[in-house]
Amino acid sequence: MAFLEISSVSKSFGAVKVLDDITLEIERGEFVVFVGPSGCGKSTLLRMITGLDSPNSGTVSIEGKVMNDIEPAKRGTAMVFQSYALYPHMSAYDNVSFGLRMAHTAKTLIRQRVDAAAAILRLDKLLHRRPRELSGGQKQRVAIGRAIVREPRVFLFDEPLSNLDAELRVQMRAELIELHRRLDVTMIYVTHDQIEAMTMADRMVVLNAGRMQQVGRPLDLYDDPDNRFVAGFVGSPRMNFLAGEVVGADATSTRLLHAGGTGPLTLPIGGLQGQLKVEIGVRPDHLRILADGEDPPPAAIAFTGRVTFVEELGNVTYVHIVLDDGTPIVVGAGRGPRIGTDDVRITAPVGHALLFAQDGCRLRGRNGTGK
């Protein structure tokens, strides 16, 4: 039995279905991230767990007990919101201890818990300050401290870093990972930022339009996506997609013509039938720009195009190219000679190419391959 179980949960607001038959198991001590575009249902799913919303159907269970009819305060969960939700007239100490005081906890126990949380979050010297005297990162720590002192079974974070600047977000991500390691409790985190999700999660849950698309470790989703949505959402820059047409297939391979290509291409995906129009997916870091006079390697995708834009980021360069047929792609290149807006030839090993049907499903073939 999993520590937290979500079973066939659906939720609608009027005629709008926000969650559609979500089933998920989360183990004790996991750091799980719900990720997806705005409006995909990830925050609503988080609110189902903590009890701020109720499912129209399905159940939420913690340690084997169904929580559907249990009020939020008795579920053993604590939620940190996108807005800090601090009382402006109270000190940081009073904000952190507010929930305990409302529960009539003994003053000595309140002091012990607040001091312990302050030590973990480096708030020791800030407890006397009011929110207006704190930075954004310090306010977020106070909000997290308010959750810690409740000693919950599950921490729930609803896009807690989105109000912070880029440098502070990176710092706070590291602090949350360290906090998870020190507390060793279950944490569920919601974000629309897939980079945030990949750097923090033990497992990612990718949602789109109220449906669960794929669950797994971040690099597993990056390397082996189940569908076009996951392939395009996980990874930055996103995966490149090229139109293709299947012209033949056997038990071990598929032959196709692809957009912008120099000729037929054979992929090691066998047993496809009835798939004429497809899309080829290739990540930017698997593409390479050929030097002048260099021939493409054998068993490679090859095409030509014109450079339109170059992003030089120091340790990596992203080259934006429009292929001869008008398809835009991005090539990840190491730091090297400056690339001008010239015609270029691009190649990638066929072993890194993924194939997707018109409905977005991954085509793996009967031999189970497809990458």
Image (tube, rainbow, N blue to C red):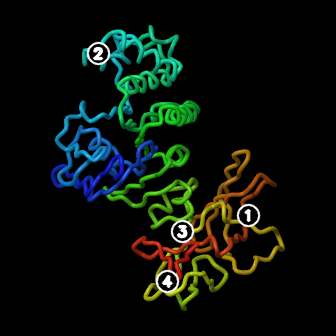
Mark 1 vs mark 3, foreground winner is: 3
User: How far separated are the C-alphas under marks 1 and 3?
Assistant: 22 Å
Does dot 2 land on a helix, a strand or a loop? loop
Name the amino acid type tagged 4: Arg
Mark 1 vs mark 4, foreground winner is: 4
- Where is residue 312? Give x, y as percent: 70, 48
Up-down: is 196 above or below 175? below
Q: Is residue 252 left or right of residue 317?
A: left
Does dot 1 land on a helix, a strand or a loop? loop
Quadrant of image for the C terminus = bottom right
Estimate how packed mark 3 is, as few (under 14), some (14 to 19) or many (20 or more) residues with alpha carbons within 10 Å.
many
User: How far separated are the C-alphas under marks 1 and 4?
Assistant: 41 Å
Up-down: is 307 above or below 155? below
Does dot 4 land on a helix, a strand or a loop? loop
Mark 4 vs mark 3, foreground winner is: 4
Residue beneath the point at 77% across and 69% down: 290
- Where is residue 243? Give x, y as percent: 52, 75
- Image mark for residue 342: 1
* Residue in front for this viewpoint, 309 or 235: 235
Q: Residue tagged by mark 2?
A: 105
Residue beneath the point at 25% across and 19% down: 103
Mark 4 vs mark 2, foreground winner is: 2
